[in-house]
Each structure stands twice: as structure tokens, then as C-alpha cells.
Amino acid sequence: MRTENGQIIHLADYRQTDFVLERVDLTFELDPTETKVEARLIFHRREGADLAAPLVLDGDELVMTGLLFDQMEMDAARYDAKPDSLTIRDLPASEPFEITITTMINPEANTQLMGLYRTNGVYCTQCEAEGFRRITYFPDRPDVLAVYTVNIIADKASCPLLLSNGNFLGGAGYGEGKHFAAWFDPHPKPSYLFALVAGDLGVVEDTFTTMSGREVTLKIYVEHGKELRAAYAMDALKRSMKWDEEVFGREYDLDIFMIVAVSDFNMGAMENKGLNVFNDKYVLADPETATDQDYANIEAIIAHEYFHNWTGNRVTCRDWFQLCLKEGLTVYRDHEFSADQRSRAVKRIAEVRHLKSEQFPEDAGPLAHPVRPTKYREINNFYTTTVYEKGSEVTRMIATIVGTDGFKKGMDLYFERHDGDAATIEDFVKCFEDANGVDLSQFSLWYHQAGTPLVSVSCSYDQAKGEFTLSLEQMIPPTPGQATKEPMHIPLRFGLLLVDGSEATPSAVSGADVTGDVLHLKERRQTVTFSGIASRPVVSLNRSFSAPINLHFEQAPADLAQIARHDSDLFSRWQALNDLALPNLVEAARKARAGEPVETNAVLADTLIAIAGDEALEPAFRAQALALPSESDIARELGSNNDPDAIRTGREAVLAFVANRDPAAFAKLFDTNRTEGAFTPDAASAGQRALRNAALAYLAVSDGTPARAAQAFASADNMTDLSAALTVLAHRFPDAPETAAALETFRARFADNALVIDKWFSIQSTIPGDGALERVKALMTSPHFNKANPNRVRALVGTFAFSNPTGFNRADGAGYRFLAEQILEIDPKNPQLAARILTSMRSWRALEEVRSDHARNALRTIAAGEKLSSDVSDIVERMLK
Ligand code: 0A1
Ligand code: ZN
């Protein structure tokens, strides 16, 4: 394992390699425990490079069994081979030379799932970020691009399928019981995009004709017998290919595009050139086993990986500090794709919910870092929601500032300038500046300053002058390593609503640049005056969440209710409901903490119910409107000294008030939104199911008995309704016999489908309250659990730690001690998985004293662990700093 020395890598130290890699020829002789890898690498010394400079290649736990220089045995005095590096001296001044390296690796023993490993008998690779160095010695960095030829030799019976990047060159028998296949990828690529898959899998096949009329073969490989469950992924792939042509003018560039679904994978999926590897959770779906959310995730992730072909593969990153260059941009592209396929406003609400619940806490805690960091210890720990989701928001703001056409011009220039390059964020931003003649230097601070900006707003109206004034102030909180911040360029979409539902158009604006409906906040403090406003307007600010900020703006409940009911921007209507609810929930938590009775504002309940029943609105939006801010939203709003039990008690009281305000209204929503006929995963049907299930959750509270949910469980004809009913039963009536019966029915019915059993684990691990930990421990002894499989561990342990605030944050600290044990047990086998689950404790400092003491102790126990991986020690040390 690469580890232990705690070395920090700095962006400022970036320099080009001394040697240029021209070509790569790889030959794999696959064997479960002794795979032989021969790498023939052709290099030449870069012009101007030091003539004495040695060639230093990266390795990770490698064993070298041969080394040739121009096909001749290399003199031992000229090289040093260590598990983590190979250094070769005395190399030619300018002419090309060939190095042939043979290594032996053990795929079966690779539990880290980085490099070449085996999953259910299938050989598979994962090379991003630094996995290729676990296969052979190599300049394993993204700015080294080369053309690869790959030969794979394997047992014919167990590996009828031999796949790698690019186009298939040919194959044949190869001695006794073996065969080989050769692949050639004409597009220069960095090593992190290399992939190899070999095994026995089923396939779904289709074709796509590109905009220039080329026919591309599409293949999705899954375990035998699961082919029918890949149909939706194939459909999503074809829609993605079409969309990228229509919206970004990007055409696919090989004869074949392949996706392989595997059951052991550390992340969601990987964009290897022409050969994407997916966590099977994001490929397999049918109505019986997948929820609407699963379908939406599959669509988004298939699109995301496909879009990487241009944003990531054709234009890649110069170094790993530039990760957001490919990730932020590609998330933005997949968000736009999903918005075009579904309801834009509903999609935006879901994105913002996710951003606020995952990225905002990261940005407010010890793990906060800039979208484009300047140092890291373990790159695996930078695949964060800041790089991905905030990175996407920053891209979205560029689009807001330069406009739709300007964004397109900038992207076209980016592809024109940088196709085939390893680029930087500066290169990217420059394209938008040059294409639009704008200066984005202040805007670029979004890449460099961590922390969620807080924008405080107040307003006043002068009837006599017909003037409306907005006073804005921005503050960017200190974050690790960044005590003080410069003011940023914050683009705020806005509208001025009048009582009659129309919008005011000011005759003049002073104090800020306003372009169209965007106000550009650039100073620390700015006062903006709108003239020619005939009556007091209600301002709808940060429409569509145009900037990823916290907004502090005390608008009167009546004003918020007006936005919630009448804004032309559907997102803002949801946002206003949220703003109406949050102070109520915060107050409820405070009261609950003080042991006082909680009062709920009837305006909130009535507005929620009115919107939920407004048939002019799409059901998916109404479902989102009904979901009160979560316990973690409330914790974030409170900021410090949090008691998760009080937060829940307060929120439950508000929820009960809403539920009991008008049970008949919820019953009507429940009864009239059942989807009839054959299941379709389209957005409209999904929206109806979401609304019906949101109503069921309220009805369970006003009913006070499990009967209705049990009935819904019994009559469900799809996984969305089935799992929603099971969740209501388990979370509301954990001890009811109906719940026990339903859980067992569900388990028995899906016992041989691990992905569905993951839902069974997650539903139970999120049952609120002190009993959760014992439940989780008991489930870990279930025959369905497998601690070597990342999906199982995430579904049970991960979900418990991330998504069960009261259960995990038990006042006696038992949740934290349990997590510490788990981390120390997982870390030696799969450090990435351990480190990721550990980030569930990123907000520990915001807990009240008793809990935060327990949390600190648990973190110290982890920090004191023997032989920690660099992944876990990096996270735990930053959390304790
Ligand atoms: N580039 C992938 C994410 C990814 C990163 C690291 C991995 O290593 C285990 C795997 C996947 C994406 O953005 O989808
Ligand atoms: Zn990605």
C-alpha cells in the first residue's frame, strides 16, 4: 500500500516530465493469482530537459521480474526497482528508446479494488486516480498521454470475453485452452483511463448512428441472466449520445462503446476510454427491483460517464489539482441533460437539496477545501462533493454570467483549443473570457476560496420616490488554511413581485451591474436602488439557486408565502417554502431542547397543504414541496452546539401539526395519485408516485396505526411504492407486527438480489432512535451481509452513519465507537471505502459537548490505529486539527 509518509503534494511544484512517452504496448497473461504484465514503453528525452535526469516511474506494491532496454537485458547498475518506484539512469540524450518491464500481480488478493482485481470471477481494472501504477511501473500522471495497444491472453473457458479500450484489432486461439485478443486505442490518453475486463458475461447490444452518419456498436455487459435489466441503461446511453450532439455538438469517436457492470466497485462508475466500468447498482433496473430514484440515478450516471468522453478524455487534466476541470464540468453537463429529459425545476430542487445536505456541511467543516485545491496528501480523498457538485455550480455560474450563447461559444473554443490536451482551470476560464470579451478574474475566486459565502440582505421601499432598495453584504467564512477571504463575484438571479402577481420592471437601477434578471454582487457591501417601482415589491432572490450561497434575508412570512404561491420561478417557490419552514423548525428544536412545548405556524401548514393540492402544479414538484427540511438541514441552520434528539423531537412536532391540520387533503392525494397500468419510469409517473408516497408518510402520522402503510405495501406493484411503504412502516412503527412481517416478506422475496437487499439494509439502518445501532450490528451478522463488498458496507454501515442522525449520534457515543471499529477493520482491506465512510463524521464539531467529546475520542482511537492507510490518516488528521 502506498502510504504512511504523509507527504504533501503541492500544485506549485508542478513541472513537466523529463521524458515524453510515445507509445505503450501492454501484454497481459491473466491468472487469478499470478498475472504477468509486460509493458513496452517508448520514450524520448524532452527537448531542453536535463541530460543527467533519470527516468523515474511510479509503482505501488509492484514486483518486477524483468527489465529490458531496447530489447536487451538491462545492466543492474543502471536501475533501482522498489515496490513504489523504478528509477533508470544513463538514458539517451534525444533519440527514442524502449523499456520493457515485466511485473507479476495478484488480482485475487487485490481487496483495495484499485489496479487489476477480480469481482465475481471477472477480471477488471480501476486506474483513476493512481491505480495504473499497481499494474506496472509507469509515469502515472494525467499529463502523460500516449497511444495504447493491449494484448490479453487468458483461459478461454472462464474468460470468453477479453476487452480493453479502443477498437478491436483481432483475436485467436493461444495454446492449450487459452486465447488472446488485441485492442488498439488511437486516441492518446493518460493511464488513468486505461481499462481491461475479462470474464464470462452476458451482453445487450444496440447501435447508434452519429450526426456524421457513422454507426457505433453499443454493448452493455452484465452477469448472465441480468440482460433484461440493462435495457434502461442502454436507452439512457443512446439519449445521452444524441443530447451531446445536439446541445454541445460532440460526436462519439470510436467504432464501439462498451459498458461493463461489476458488483464490487468503490465508486459509481468510471469513464475509461470506450470501456466504461460501472457499479452494477447504476446499470441494472426493472420495475420490480428498481425505484424511480434508481432509474434517475442510472440515467444521470450513464450520461455523466458518456459525457466524460469529451470533458475528461479528449480534454483531460494537467494534474490532479485540476480534477474539477473534468468533474465539475461533467456534473454540470449531466445536470443539464437530466433537466432536459425531466422537469427542469424539479431537477434543480433535487440538486440543491443534495448540494445543501452534502456539500455545504463539507464546506463548513474541517474537510473544507477549494474547488481547485493547491495541496493534497491523498488524491483519493479529493473526489468530493466540493470538487463535483460545487464545481458544477461554478460552471453553472459561468453560464449565468456569459449567457446561453456565450457559454456555447466558450465551450466551442475550449474544445477547439484544448482537444488532445491536458489542461488547467485557468485554460478553461480563459476560453469563456476570450469568447465573450469578459473579465472573469474576480469570478475565479470561486475556484480558489473555500467556504460557502453568506449573503445578508435587507430591503426598503420608498413609496413617495417609487424606489426600492436592496442592501447586500457578503461574507466568506474562514476555512482550514484560509483565514481571510476576498469578496467574490456572485451572480444573483432575481425578480420583483407585485401584489397582483406581475413583476416590476424598474426604470433604472443604480449601485450594481444588472444584466437581464441577474444582479452582479461584487463588493463586500453594495446598496442597489431600483427606480420606477409603483408599489412595494416582494423580492425573489437567488432564483434557480443561481449562486451556491447561504442567504440571510428576513422576509416576512406573508412575503414568503406570496413567493411560494405565485413566483414564476418554480424553484423559488420551493425555496420560499423552505425559508418559511426552516425558522419554524429551528425554533421547534430550541423549544424541544428546553423541554418546552412546540408551536407551529399555521401559515406554514396551510401553504404546504395548498401547494400540495394545487393541481395546476406537477406532482413531482408538489412532492418536493411536502418534504420538510431535513434534520441535517436544521442542524446546519443551527450551526453549533447541536443536539440531534432535540432537532428530531422539534421537527416531529411540526410534522405532526402539518399531518393533523388536514388529513383529508393527504388522503385525497394518496387515493388519487396511484399510477395505474404497466409501470413506466418516466418523470410524470415518477412524480405521481412521489406525491402519493409523500402523502402516505403524513397519513401514517395522523392515522397513528400501520394499517394504511401495510395495505400500501401489500398492494404495491413496483419497487418505488413497495420500498416507500416499507420505509413508512419501519420508521414510524418499528415494533409493529405488520412491520416485522413486511420486512420478512421483502427479504424473502428478494433474497437473491443483493441490490434490493441493500435497500432492506438501508431502510432498517435509518430507523431513528437509540435502537438503531443494535439493529445494524444484528444485520451485520445476516447471511446477506458481506463486508468485502463496498455496496453492502455502504448500504448498512454507511447509511447508518450518514443518514441516521439520532441513531448514529447516540448521546452515549456508542455510534462513534462502532464506526471507529468498522473503520479500523475496513481500512487494511479497502482504504478508499474506509476513508469515505469516515467522512460521515465531518460535522462532529457542531455537536453539543457530550457528543462532541465522544466523537473526538472515537476519532483519536482511529488516529492511533496501527498502519493506517494514507487515505484514512489524511481524513482523520484533518478532522482532528
Ligand atoms: N471519474 C469517475 C469517478 C471515479 C473516481 C475514482 C475511482 O476510483 C475508485 C472510480 C471512479 C467519475 O467521475 O465518474
Ligand atoms: Zn466524473
Image (tube, grey):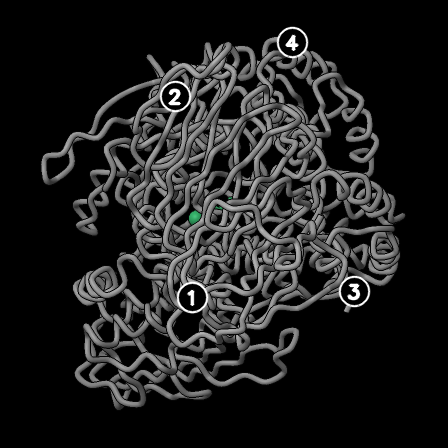
**Crowd class of label 4 (few under 14; some 14 to 19; many from 20; radius 10 Å):** few
First in sequence: mark 1 or mark 2? 1
Residue 532, by quadrant, is: bottom left
| Identity of the residue drawn at 27% across and 56% down | 568
SS under mark 1: strand
First in sequence: mark 2 or mark 3? 2
- Return the residue at label 3: 880
Q: Residue 671: horizontal and vertical position, in percent?
A: 43, 22
Q: In the picture provided, is 40 more to the left or to the right than 248?
A: right
- Return the residue at label 2: 230
Q: Three-letter amino acid code at disc 1? A: Arg
Task: Tell me the number on the disc at residue 764.
Answer: none
First in sequence: mark 3 or mark 1? 1
Q: Nearer the viewer, residue 733 or 164?
A: 164
- Return the residue at label 1: 45
Q: Three-letter amino acid code at disc 4? A: Ala
SS under mark 4: helix
- Return the residue at label 4: 748
First in sequence: mark 3 or mark 4? 4
Measure the alpha-carbon separation of dots 1 and 2: 47 Å
Q: Residue 740: horizontal and vertical position, in percent?
A: 72, 16
Q: Three-letter amino acid code at disc 3? A: Leu
Q: Nearer the viewer, residue 216 or 543?
A: 216
